[in-house]
Image (cartoon, rainbow, N blue to C red):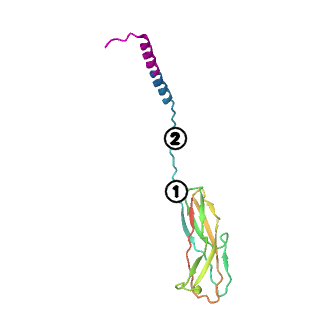
């Protein structure tokens, strides 16, 4: 092969090499324009919240045809009480039954063997806050329906659930 002596060829070849090198350098300059940042992942594990019954809801004695009876959550010795423990100084929510439950005697198969309990309330109402020691006392009240004239005599009981959570 013969050497090329044409100056135009060498000029164009040099310009081509310079252009390609410039593009490569330009692309690298763009590609190297990046930035990074770090973040931490964190979590806090808190003490579990727990609830335990310390007293049942007490409606006492009733006679046939007695009117409805409300036990308030805010005062008295007949209200149900619960001990709450968990993370100190932390707010919690309270859920009491939204509907009614039945206290029954015998098999509870007839209306005369059932007494409805409804309108549950709590004190504190809706939310509470644990003390600096991580404790609180929760009270629950409700309304017992009127006693039917034909109500079966006997001891009546029924259960309800109170839920607390953070």
Q: x, y (%) of residue 161?
A: 56, 70
Q: x, y (%) of residue 99?
A: 61, 73
> Which secondary structure class fits the magenta region best?
helix
Q: x, y (%) of residue 54?
A: 56, 70
Measured Cα–Cα span from mark 1 to mark 2: 26 Å
Q: Nearer the viewer, mark 1 or mark 2?
A: 2
The disc label shown at residue 47, or none: 1
Residue sitting farthest toward the bottom: 150
- Quadrant occupied by the N terminus: top left
Q: Is residue 116 visible?
A: yes
Q: Give the mark nearest the N terminus, 1 or 2.
A: 2
Vertical order, 103 against 90 (above or below): below
Q: Residues within 10 Å of mark 2 (few under 14, many from 20)?
A: few
Closer to the camera in the image, 39 or 28: 28
Question: Where does label 2 land, which residue?
Answer: 39
Q: x, y (%) of residue 11?
A: 44, 13
**Residue 10 lies within the magenta run:** yes
Stretch in magenta: 1-19
């Amino acid at each position: 092969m013969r050497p090329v002596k044409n100056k135009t060829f060498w000029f164009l070849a040099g310009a081509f090499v310079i252009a390609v090198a410039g593009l490569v350098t330009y692309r690298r300059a763009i590609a190297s324009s990046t930035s990074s940042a770090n973040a931490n992942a964190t979590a806090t594990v808190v003490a579990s919240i727990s609830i335990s019954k310390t007293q049942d809801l007490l409606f006492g004695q009733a006679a046939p045809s007695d009117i409805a009876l409300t036990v308030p959550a805010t005062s008295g010795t007949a209200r149900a009480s619960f001990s709450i423990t968990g993370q100190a100084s932390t707010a919690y929510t309270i859920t009491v039954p939204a509907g009614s439950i039945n206290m029954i005697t015998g098999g509870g198969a007839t209306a005369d063997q059932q007494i409805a309990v409804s309108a549950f309330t709590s004190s504190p109402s809706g939310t509470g806050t644990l003390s600096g020691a991580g404790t609180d006392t929760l009270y629950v009240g409700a309304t017992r329906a009127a006693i039917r004239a034909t109500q079966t005599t006997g001891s009546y009981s029924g259960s309800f659930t109170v839920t607390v959570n953070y």
